[in-house]
Image (cartoon, helix red, strand yellow):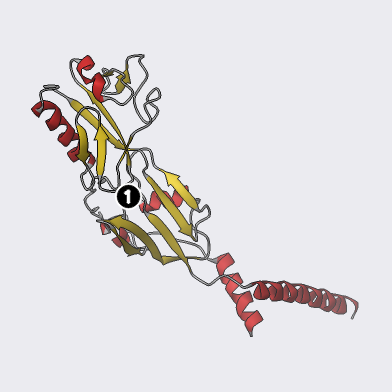
Amino acid sequence: MMVLAVVTMTSCINTKKLILLKNMDENTSYPIGALQDLKVQMDDRLSIFVTSKNAELATPFNQTGQTLSIDETGQLRNAAGSRGGNDRGGIQAGYLVDREGYIQFPILGRMKVAGLTRKETSELIQNELINQGYISDPIVYVEIQNLRVTMMGEVNSQGSQSVTNARITLLEAISRAGGMTANADLQNVEVIREEGGVRNMYRLDVESTDIFQSPAFYLQQNDIVYVHPKFPPSTVKEERTLRFYSIAVGMFSFIASLFVLFK
């Protein structure tokens, strides 16, 4: 009976077709929940770049001491002309958010940023620069360097994924993980998220369009995605029994064929 169950289970897994969003109708529009800007968390590493019309005034407030300016396309560039981003001509060190939620910013000193969005962090620094009389027209760019999610369970490529554009959906992360295995339980996908110093878990059914309304549809930094298995993994004993059974069935079929052939 156990052998038959293992064979049946293996057969089901091997032939199962995964269909995501199977209740989605081409004639229906599905509203997407509001995209929330990422909030800075403890242990995040931030890229913060300051510029202004007088770019030299901003130089002391940039970590490498480089003069940054905005080109005609709106891109941030350093004095050598290299484009900004996470590889801004060596401007990669970033500001680590300590366990109390603070960063140590040049000249302005210790500033609390945990719990703020990137826009709010930018506005906080801009206001301080203006109020303290350092720059009258500062422009501050804030990025989260360590935006990554971890994929676990029934996906074809487990591990961490780095996200460069500060936005990724659950479906995109699953696709980047090589999709889900045939043993994935589509109705039981968990997103574990750090929020306000605690971890919360969101359970999603990726067969349903309801995921569009879930706060976990757009992933955030340090999210863990765990895809549950449809069936529990076979034990070593069950695998050995299955192999033995397969060999026995093959031999029986061969003998039966010979019997029919020479009858």
Element on which disc 1 rests: loop
Residue 246 as seen in the image, left or right of residue 207: right
Please name whichever residue, 58 or 168, is drawn nearer the observer in this view of the structure.
Answer: 58
Q: Is residue 183 above or below residue 166?
A: below
Please name whichever residue, 178 or 194, is drawn nearer the observer in this view of the structure.
Answer: 194
Residue 134 as seen in the image, left or right of residue 236: left
Residue 18 as seen in the image, left or right of residue 111: right
The image position of residue 213, as x and y in percent, is: 25, 58
The image position of residue 158, as x and y in percent, is: 50, 53
The image position of residue 91, as x and y in percent, is: 36, 26
What residue appears at the point 82 percent right and 73 percent down from the top-left corner?
254
The residue lying furthest to the right in this view is 262
What residue appears at the point 35 percent right and 15 percent down from the top-left corner?
81
Question: What is the total number of numbered labels drawn onto the structure image?
Answer: 1
Please name whichever residue, 17 or 39, is drawn nearer the observer in this view of the structure.
Answer: 39
Q: Quadrant of the N terminus?
A: bottom right
The residue carrying pointer 1 sits among few (fewer than 14), some (14 to 19) or many (20 or more) residues within 10 Å by Cα, namely many
Q: Is residue 238 above or below residue 129?
A: below
Q: Quadrant of the C terminus?
A: bottom right
Please name whichever residue, 109 or 157, is drawn nearer the observer in this view of the structure.
Answer: 109
Q: Is residue 119 above or below residue 30?
A: above
The residue indicated by pointer 1 is 220
What residue appears at the point 32 percent right and 63 percent down from the top-left corner?
202
What residue appears at the point 38 percent right and 38 percent down from the top-left corner?
164
The image position of residue 141, as x and y in percent, is: 25, 31
Identify the image quadrant of residue 238: bottom right
Identify the image quadrant of residue 120: top left
- Three-letter amino acid code of the residue under disc 1: Gln
